[in-house]
Image (tube, rainbow, N blue to C red):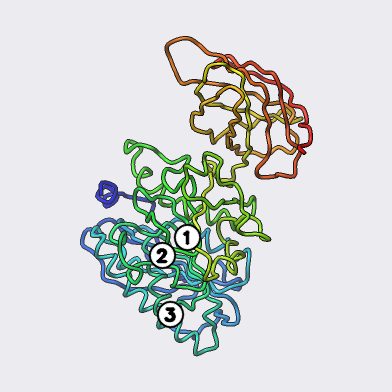
């Protein structure tokens, strides 16, 4: 609840509308509006490839630009405790239009979402859903199809999308929930929140499950970047100001937007927990065969036919990300056999280098492992760059102890295998001694083929 209390007084960037502007703009309010509260008013703004920069305000299906033969994507924001316009909306609109010719309807319910009383905004969410249902009913009468409707809801907006889906008996084409709101929705029955029956396909990204988001599964497929809690690059303490409260929550939006840029595909893996994934126990996607592992974001719908089978359980997907765009992490399995007589417990940091001397340092390190004589340990290590030809590898072993004797780890065999690109040749090193806290660099050799 601390986050909720402090977020009420957060002043974020506002987007002010020029009084002489002819293009409809998102309603920009201020913290003073939040203090006195706002009555619900919904503004619907249409963007297409014919009017990508200047919205057309919709009051009905009578429109210059609305093409009901095309897909329609609704963008629904969440709670706005200061009244500012969401800074990510223009970017998301442009990215969606760049990948597909569609109708994009931005649902501006800032009047109704702007209040310091979160429960008031939550109550307004069902009223917003009723307004959207009326528009969709008109669209259907004019020839639109429920199959062609995609709702992208952020925080409270995810539950609004769910309420709309319920009103159409789950026949909407798709709902994407971006860190659906947790407060007042945790533990609620399906009819009071987003759930898999609200659309033909429901995909969810959870990025702040220990704060403003919802921890449990809500869709046919639920993605948990970095376990769904602390996101890389986000502040870890309250002393960092309001970024501490909003950064993890907003990361789901930026991950979804990154998927539209196609700079890299973020692969996710089915697993029972993030800990099991980090321990290298969940790096197979056999259950999706002949499809590969699902990818995060806009293109997750390619796995719809498999995920919506009645016999298929809800699927939790885990993966790691980098701290900034494009967010992709490239993973290696490192199999290590040691020959120390005594058990050594510690961690590794790894640096890869290519022909040109470019370096990639491990961004995702495993937890401390116990290295025992002749026992193989497999570590999952991630990098924010991908090198097709790794020429040098640097290792540093640490027990984490600042006092006491310094140990050595004696490695009998080490094998590097790319999880991201398993077809690449595996790299090996034999008979290596690592003094604690000392970087050792070597040239790997191709591993012999396994029989």
Q: CA distance from mark 1 to mark 2?
A: 9 Å
Question: Horizontally, is 231 left or right of 435 in the view?
Answer: left
Q: Which residue is mark 1?
A: 204
Question: Horizontally, is 178 left or right of 242 in the view?
Answer: right
Q: Position of residue 205 (x, y in %)?
A: 47, 56
Q: CA distance from mark 3 to mark 1?
A: 19 Å
Q: Nearer the viewer, residue 303 or 299?
A: 303
Q: Residue furthest bottom?
A: 141
Cβ–Cβ below 8 Å for labels 1 and 2?
yes
- The residue carrying pointer 1 sits among few (fewer than 14), some (14 to 19) or many (20 or more) residues within 10 Å by Cα, namely many
Q: Residue furthest top?
A: 405
- The relative height of residue 348 versus residue 56 in the rendered view (above or below) is above
Question: Closer to the N terminus: mark 1 or mark 2?
Answer: 2
- Quadrant of the image containing the C terminus: top right
Looking at the rendering, which quadrant does residue 52 occupy? bottom right
Residue displayed at 66% across by 59% down:
289
Q: Position of residue 395 (x, y in %)?
A: 62, 23
Q: Nearer the viewer, residue 155 or 368?
A: 368
Q: Position of residue 65 (x, y in %)?
A: 56, 79
SS label for mark 2 = helix
Looking at the rendering, which quadrant does residue 442 occupy? top right
Residue displayed at 66% across by 30% down:
352
Q: Nearer the viewer, residue 187 or 32?
A: 187
What label sits on residue 104 in the rendered view?
none
Question: Closer to the N terminus: mark 2 or mark 3?
Answer: 2
Residue displayed at 40% across by 63% down:
77
- The residue carrying pointer 3 sits among few (fewer than 14), some (14 to 19) or many (20 or more) residues within 10 Å by Cα, namely few
Q: Which residue is mark 3?
A: 169
- The relative height of residue 66 versus residue 248 in the rendered view (above or below) is below
Q: CA distance from mark 2 to mark 3?
A: 17 Å
What label sits on residue 158 in the rendered view?
2
- The residue carrying pointer 2 sits among few (fewer than 14), some (14 to 19) or many (20 or more) residues within 10 Å by Cα, namely many
């Amino acid at each position: 609840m601390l986050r909720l209390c402090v977020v009420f007084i957060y002043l974020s960037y506002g987007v002010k509308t020029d009084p002489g502007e002819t293009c409809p703009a998102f309603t920009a309010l201020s913290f003073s509006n939040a203090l006195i509260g706002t009555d619900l008013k919904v503004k619907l703004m249409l963007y297409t490839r014919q009017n990508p920069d200047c919205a057309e305000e919709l009051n009905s299906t009578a429109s210059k630009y609305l093409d009901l033969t095309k897909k329609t994507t609704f963008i629904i924001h969440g709670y706005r405790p200061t009244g500012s316009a969401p800074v990510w909306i223009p970017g998301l609109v442009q990215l969606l239009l760049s990948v597909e010719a569609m109708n994009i309807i931005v649902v501006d319910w800032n009047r109704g979402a702007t209040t310091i009383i979160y429960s008031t905004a939550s109550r307004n969410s069902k009223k917003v859903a009723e307004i959207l249902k009326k528009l969709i009913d008109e669209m259907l009468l004019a020839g639109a199809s429920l199959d062609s409707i995609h709702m992208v809801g952020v925080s409270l907006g995810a539950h609004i999308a769910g309420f709309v889906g319920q009103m159409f008996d789950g026949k909407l084409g798709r709902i994407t929930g971006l860190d659906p709101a947790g407060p007042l929705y945790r533990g609620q029955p399906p009819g009071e929140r987003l759930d898999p029956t609200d659309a033909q396909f429901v995909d969810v990204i959870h990025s702040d499950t220990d704060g403003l988001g919802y921890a449990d599964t809500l869709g046919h497929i639920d993605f948990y970047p970095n376990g769904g809690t602390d996101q890389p690059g986000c502040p870890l303490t309250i002393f960092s100001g309001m970024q501490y409260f909003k950064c993890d929550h907003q990361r789901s939006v930026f991950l979804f937007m990154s998927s539209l840029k196609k700079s890299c595909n973020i692969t996710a893996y089915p697993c029972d927990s993030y800990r099991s994934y980090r321990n290298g126990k969940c790096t197979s996607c056999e259950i999706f065969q002949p499809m590969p592992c699902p990818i995060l974001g806009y293109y997750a719908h390619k796995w719809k036919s498999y995920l919506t089978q009645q016999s298929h359980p809800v699927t939790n997907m885990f993966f790691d990300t980098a701290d900034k765009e494009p967010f992709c992490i490239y993973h290696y399995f490192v199999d290590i056999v040691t020959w120390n007589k005594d058990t050594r417990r510690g961690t590794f940091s790894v640096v890869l280098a290519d022909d040109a001397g470019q370096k990639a340092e491990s961004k995702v390190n495993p937890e401390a492992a116990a290295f025992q004589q002749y026992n193989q340990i497999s570590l999952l290590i991630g990098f924010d760059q991908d090198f097709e030809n790794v020429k040098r590898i640097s290792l540093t072993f640490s027990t984490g102890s600042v006092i006491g004797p310094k140990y050595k780890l004696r490695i009998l065999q080490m094998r590097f295998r790319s999880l991201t690109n398993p077809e690449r040749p595996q790299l090996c090193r034999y008979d290596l001694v690592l003094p604690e806290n000392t970087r050792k660099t070597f040239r790997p050799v191709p591993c012999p083929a396994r029989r």
